[in-house]
Image: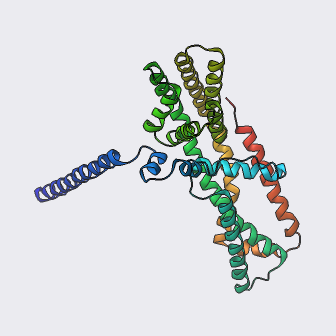
Amino acid sequence: MLDLILRVSVLLAIFASVFVLSQLVLGGMWRSRSRTAAVNRRLELIKLGSDRATIAAQLRKNAPSDFSQYPSLIARPLRALQSALFASAVSFTLGQMLFWMGFALVLLSLGLMLLFSLSGIPLTAGVVLLAIVLAACVAIGLPVVIVNIFAQRRRKKMEQQFPVALDIFVRALRSGHPVAGAINLLTNEMEDPIGSEFGIVADEIAYGADLTDALESMADRWDMEDIRMFVVSLAVQAETGGNLAEILENLSTVIRARASLFMKVRALSSEGRMTGWILTVLPIITFVSMFLINPRFYTDVARDTIFVVGFPSLIIVYFIGVFWIRKLVDIKV
């Protein structure tokens, strides 16, 4: 019994020593990195010696466009995808993503059809349609879902940072800084995404753009009502005068109260939103899982001629249901 206690004590001592040592080493490395790393992406690019015009173009390369030259049925998904690409801060453009998704779709479709053919399954119209749909789920659905997840995370961080940015802006104004100086302070002190966004505004102002127009462009890029209220407050104060610091302090209070109300609504509607997610994702997971477990469950049915009509109809009904569910759980605050 004594030997067992000693053995456990030694093992615990070794574990505690390794844990404390790793924490000290990793903590020192993290503190050293935090002292030397740039605050945001824009400052990092400036530190590397890039030109400010080039930096602004790089940071705005996925800024949402209106796509007015396309029909509404095509323009809306393109606009939504480009907005998600901009918010997620990925390195590729909309055209590059569409190209690689199309390339992956063709490659996976041909690969699945070749696999079906080698398995002795005749390539009827239904089997070809099944292969294209399976390839689309992987080549189109998966990248879009991943990009939207990253975009939602950065949008949420932007919403959380904005009231803090307003507080810094108010303190800068009260300490005697002009509006342009307060914006420059935000670019040097705030992390991404809001630090780089105000950096773009500062660069646009430095190149001759109007302050209100530059801030409106930022609001359009992120499609945030909080930024639009900030722009309206600046525009009204510029026209009518008044204490800008006090106006923005009240605006910060309103934004925080609105965010608190929004979180309460999200908490109360969490069950409905989770149900909506399950009803949206479950058919796709079931479809892919059943195909991976037993491919002939679908390939045998796909040989029937009615599959060519029934399967696309089922997909259309599914997307109508997804659209309807999103409308039901999308509560505006």
Q: Residue furthest left?
A: 2
| Image: 245 above or below 186 | above
| Image: 281 above or below 243 | below
Q: Quadrant of the N terminus?
A: bottom left
Image point (61%, 48%), residue name? 60
* Picture quadrant of residue 147: bottom right
Q: Is residue 161 left or right of residue 18?
A: right
Asked if one can make out residue 84 in the rendered structure from this viewpoint, the answer is yes
Q: Quadrant of the C terminus?
A: top right
Task: Report the front residue among 143 and 99.
Answer: 99
Image point (75%, 70%), residue name? 132
Q: Is residue 328 left or right of residue 3?
A: right
- Display coloring: rainbow
* Picture quadrant of residue 93: bottom right
Q: Residue furthest front?
A: 208
Asked if one can make out residue 301 in the rendered structure from this viewpoint, the answer is no
Residue 139: % across, % down: 67, 65
Task: Report the front residue among 39 and 311.
Answer: 39
| Image: 181 above or below 151 | above
Image point (70%, 77%), residue name? 112
Image point (52%, 42%), residue name? 196
Residue 273: % across, % down: 65, 41
